[in-house]
Amino acid sequence: MNQLNPYAWIDRSLETIRQANWYRTVRSIESLPGNAATIEGRALINFGSNDYLGLAGDERMIRAAMLATQQFGTGATGSRLTSGHKQLHQDLEEAIVGLKGTEAALVFSSGYLANLGTIAALAGKQDLILSDRVNHSSLKNGARLSGAKIMEYRHCDVADLQELLQAHRDSYRRCLIITDTVFSMDGDICPLPEILALAIEHHAMLLVDEAHATGIFGRNGAGVVEHFDLVGQPLIEMGTLSKALGSLGGYVAASAPIVDFLKNRCASWIYTTGLSPADTAAALTAIEIVTTTPQLRQQLWQNVANLKQQITAQLPELRLIPSQSPIICIELPDASTAMSIGSQLQHAGIFAPAIRPPTVPTSRIRLSLMATHQPAQLTDLVTAIGQIFTPTSVS
Ligand SMILES: *Cc1c(COP(=O)(O)O)cnc(C)c1O
């Protein structure tokens, strides 16, 4: 009978995924977002959140979302070009412009949609896209959707990028370089000044993904572009409202003509419903908090330094993946070890997700630090890791 069932292959595929230890399921977190997470009725110290500044559970954000809902309702009710545009969206776009120092900005329903639509609008069949090999899924899929020729350069390898540009740039009409600024699964940052210089030299567009940098890097929290003092340079920035900004949605910040073009050509912005009033108001409040409270960023970076210092001093045998961000990964030999250590950490009161292939080539425990982690929570983490990791589990 199985030959007659067109869906039978799905069971076989799931079985293969399980056998490789790649099978994934969701886990419910039952508490307000914060430095602790209640999972299966137990409060765990939370090292699995992208809420770097602790804003997703912040009272000011919740109040702004509730007020906006009372005033404007739960849904935007239409696409921005039809009935879904509100002054609130414009206020948020102006706040992003203020944060980023660009001429204009455009808010999307998610960061993923921002990347898909923007890349597909900027490049086409006659064009070349050069993409860092470990870029986020949304950048890679945006490149595929565009129909352009895609070439991947070695991770953060400026010499490789330069070779590809020299060899191939002239065979294509337009060229677009795409890269994460903070790499979400390793925590390292891209060599942006060198990449930008190559883009300028070879008349290439450059789109950078600031998803894990917005609100965290740079003097005002604008991101890695600000960190490298590159505000005002000819590049396109995108990011998300859902990580350090604690809301939902994505953005593109760029020159006025680029944003104008996207409003006319970007399908994932034109043909989707506008961001909800609650998400829009929360993101707007988050940007106000980010720009007026540099102490939050200082606390976060202090926690990063503190944890790295404790690990170096007490657990020198751990293999940490090089990182310049609040994302700190412990490299592990295989998926089943990562899963086992993840669940042992959970027993010890620590939530830190195991990340496995196909998301990353090498399995790991991924720790995300927050500004709101207390020193005692970091000490508890280091103690738990020390008790769980044996020389065999890390070699
Ligand atoms: C999370 C993430 C996105 C997607 O953002 P969402 O708003 O969650 O859709 C895009 N790029 C990178 C690098 C990310 O980490």
Image: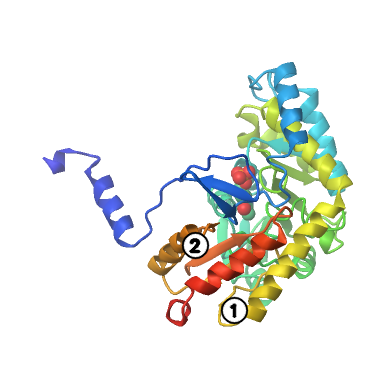
How far is mark 2 from mark 1, CA to CA?
16 Å
Depth order, front residue of 50/274: 50
Sequence-wise first label, 2 or 1: 1
Q: Which mark is residue 345?
A: 2
Residue 103 position, x and y percent, is 86, 43
Residue 13 horizontal side relative to residue 28, left or right: left
| Residue occupying the point 78% across, 34% down | 60
**Crowdedness near tag 2: few (<14), some (14–19) or many (≥20) residues, C-alpha within 10 Å:** many
The residue type indicated by label 1 comes to: Leu
Comparing 346 with 12, the one in front is 346
In this view of the protein, which residue sits in the foreground, 104 or 313? 313
Residue 291 location (% of width, % of height): 86, 46
- Quarter of the picture containing the N terminus is top left
Closest to the observer: 84 or 14?
A: 14
Can you tell which quarter of the image residue 153 is in?
Answer: bottom right
Label placed on residue 315: 1
Neighbour class for label 1 at 10 Å: few (<14), some, many (≥20)? some
Q: Is residue 13 visible?
A: yes
When the figure is inspected, residue 66 is found, relative to residue 219, above or below; the finding is: above
In terms of image quadrants, where is residue 334?
A: bottom left
Q: At 59% from the left edge and 79% from the top edge, which residue is drawn?
A: 315
Q: Secondary structure at mark 2?
A: helix
